[in-house]
Amino acid sequence: MDIVTGIIKLLFGSKADKDRKAIEPYVNKIKEVYPSIAALSNDELRGRSQALMKQINEASFAVDEAVLFLDTHPENQDALRYYQAVRDMRNQAIAAYESQFGPLRYADVTSSSWDWVTEKWPWEGGC
């Protein structure tokens, strides 16, 4: 079973071989929209995801530490520049993760209504 089929089975709870026909259109659409993900093995995909999450976590830690320092040293310009640099690093790491693996935060919904679940899914041409 490839990674895309595994994801679809995980999402839809398909366990039997007869269900493969039911989910096949979704699998094919995901492979069409995300050919680079379809070509990866589970280990490669997990490795990429973990590497990006490590970058996000490290940058997030640096942001939190800079914020704590700035709370007690609000006039320190070096600290402010450091905060801005690590904040940008964190945002870039999150953007890289989301471009490959999907959104991390529901807070990224930008419309005036809560359409997080009503927008098109990736295999429907969304994102």
Image (cartoon, helix red, strand yellow):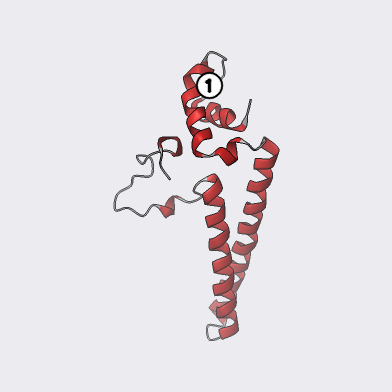
The residue under label 1 is 14
- The residue shown at (65%, 61%) is 58
66 is higher (above) or lower (below) than 49: below
Residue at horizontal 63 percent and vertical 47 percent from the top: 49
| Left or right relative to 30: residue 114 | left
x, y percent for residue 8: 53, 29
Q: Nearer the viewer, residue 120 or 60?
A: 120
Single out the residue that lies furthest toward the left: 112
| Residue at x-position 36% and y-position 55% | 110
Quadrant containing the C terminus in the rendered view: top left
Spot occupied by residue 23 in the image (x, y as percentages of width and height): 49, 23
Query: Residue 46 placed where, x, y %?
Result: 66, 42
Most foreground residue, 92 or 15:
92
The relative height of residue 76 versus residue 41 in the rendered view (above or below) is below
How many neighbours does mark 1 have within 10 angstroms: few (below 14), some (14-19), or many (20 or more)? Answer: some
Nearest the viewer among 59 and 1 is 1
Residue located at (50% from left, 17% from top): 21
Q: Is residue 3 left or right of residue 124?
A: right
Q: Secondary structure at mark 1?
A: loop
* Figure quadrant of the N terminus: top right
Q: Quadrant of residue 9?
A: top right
**Circle 1: residue type:** Ser
User: Does residue 114 lie above or below 57 as drawn?
Assistant: above
